Amino acid sequence: MQASSRSAVATMLPASAYVDPVVYERERQAIFAREWAFAADTVQLSSPGSYVATTVAGYPIVVVNDAGTLRGFQNVCRHRGGPLVWDGGGSCKGFVCRYHGWSYGLDGALQTARDFGDDALPRDGLSLHDVRVEAWRGLVFVNLERGAPALVDWLGGFAGECDGYAMESFRPVRRSSHRISANWKVYAENYQEGYHIPLVHPGLNRQIDARRYEVDVREGYCVHRAPAREGAVTSGTWLWRFPGLALNLYPNGMCLETYAPVGAGETQIEYVFFFAEGTGADEIEASVASSTAILDEDRVICEVVQRNYASGLYGGGLLSPRHEAGVAYVQELVLRATAAALAP
Ligand code: FES
Ligand SMILES: [Fe+2]
């Protein structure tokens, strides 16, 4: 019988990939301008005129309910780049640019160019630039790339993993935003392994058996698993999808997490906590507090790692065959996406 051997592999990205603004710009264009990004939940966009503004890796986007149809636009005026909306969301009958007051319908068509002084202005060519919008099971995603696959095809097997959960019946009850001073890949790689749990997350380590934490690498996404310790109640399905989407599903709720870069050394993280109707306030508070504590612990370690990469002393390392297949997968997908973008 042949013994199976698994050897450590070297990390594939140099430290500079985590600190170089040129790499950040390349990844914005090669990854975040081409992948689907969570923008809102359908509850936020349920009434005509309701809108949500968001920024994904520096790209400002607004999604609106136009008489029952979800539309997405760049949140950038066609006159000289002003913002159509500058709050995170609300309700409106149309968009009025906050700079000089050009107005647009909810379908993106230019309606008036206030006091512009050109009667022959070619209105038809001055509609807002649209972005693709698709909804899946109560979650609304946007994509700047016209040729991107349909959202369900992009989700692929990730969507199938959610089949057993009543996602549409869950209600978004809490949201929180966080900024960490670390490259988005430092955060993604940290997310993709349970190896650090005993040292970084003592509370979580009491709930789950981290030695048996597994990350199954699938096509574009990963499934995380860890058995609960005796008496603990942790159960459910934990999913991650490249580049910045994580969804933890439980019988009575789900926690959606997204992250995206805002610079080479800064990452924006958003959480939405959904629960089934009738979930008690104590349970909601406990769940939010637990996620926030884990994030705070990850923030500390990610920010130190970022500083170490930026210091110039780190020259690459090794990945555990037992624990860090998910980290290798992040690096592989980043390399694949950026190589494809650089190809002539
Ligand atoms: S930039 Fe929008 S009206 Fe001038
Ligand atoms: Fe962690």
Image (cartoon, rainbow, N blue to C red):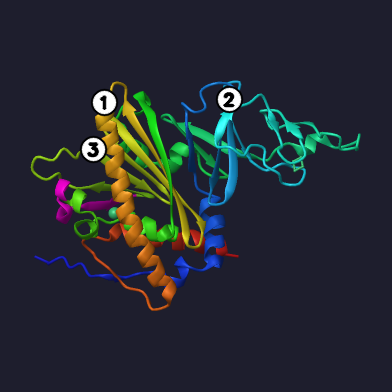
Cβ–Cβ under 8 Å for marks 1 and 3 = no
Q: Residue at the location (45% across, 43% down)? A: 154
Mark 2, secondary structure of its residue: strand
Q: Quadrant of residue 121?
A: top right
Q: Where residue 126 sits: x, y (%)?
A: 77, 38
Residue 44 seen anywhere in this rendered image of the structure = yes
Kindly identify which residue carries mark 2.
69
x and y percent of residue 263 in the render? 52, 59
> Looking at the image, how many numbered discs can be counted on the residues?
3
**Badge 1 is on which residue?**
280
Callout 1: SS: loop
Which residue is label 3 attached to?
236
Amino acid of disc 1 = Gly
Q: Residue at x 90, y 37 (%)?
A: 117
Q: Quadrant of ligand 2?
A: bottom left
Q: Quadrant of residue 137?
A: top left
First in residue order: circle 1 vs circle 2: 2
